Amino acid sequence: MLLVGTVSGAANAALSQCSSGNLCLWLSNDYSGGFDQSTGYIILGAVYNNQTDSVASYGNVNCAQFFDRQDLTGENIYFSRPGRGGTYRDPNLGNGGGYGSTAHLPWNHKIGSANWRTCPF
Ligand SMILES: [Ca+2]
């Protein structure tokens, strides 16, 4: 899913926007602001690159992975899924988030793309 300028500015943004089976991202903290979700991957276009502040991983099989770059490569963090337990969402990426070697660093205003990966734990 290529987002060039279509992230919705929903007034009633909330965690409940994120449907089961989707990876979800919001432009503001606490699952608010512009929102997008996908059962596949997400490439954020120029307008929404480096804007995400909160995420949720509601997959049924795999873990969700969020990348710094806009091409599903490079520095990344990942999240579990509800059925697996552990951390599967984060309302504030600014204080770190999820799992991975850079998960302790601020990840707000950093994400450029997202995809699924085999849960590594
Ligand atoms: Ca966090």
Image: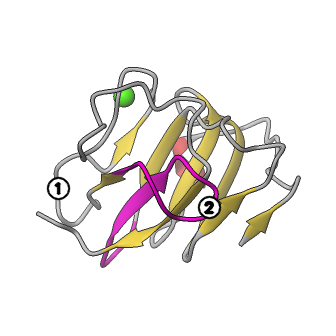
Q: In the rendering, at what x and y percent does residue 71 appear?
A: 61, 64
Q: In the rendering, at what x and y percent does residue 105 appear?
A: 35, 26
Q: On the rendered image, what quadrant is the N terminus found in? A: bottom right
Mark 1: give few (<14), some (14-19) or many (20+) Cα within 10 Å: few
Q: Quadrant of ligand 1?
A: top left
Tell which circle, 2 or 1, labels the residue nearer the N-terminal end.
2
Q: Left or right: 8 with respect to 57? A: right
Q: In the rendering, at what x and y percent does residue 43 appear?
A: 67, 62
Q: Which residues are magenta?
A: 59-77
Answer whether residue 75 is magenta in the image: yes
Q: Secondary structure at mark 2?
A: strand
User: Disc number at residue 85?
Assistant: 1
Q: Quadrant of residue 110?
A: top right
Q: Left or right: 25 with respect to 97? A: right
Q: Amino acid at mark 2?
A: Gln
Residue on which disc 2 sits: 37
Q: On the rendered image, what quadrant is the C terminus found in? A: bottom left
Residue ID at (56%, 32%): 53
Disc 1 C-beta below 8 A from ligand 1 = no
Q: Quadrant of residue 18?
A: bottom right
Q: Measure the alpha-carbon separation of dots 2 and 1.
A: 20 Å
Q: Main secondary structure of the magenta part?
A: loop
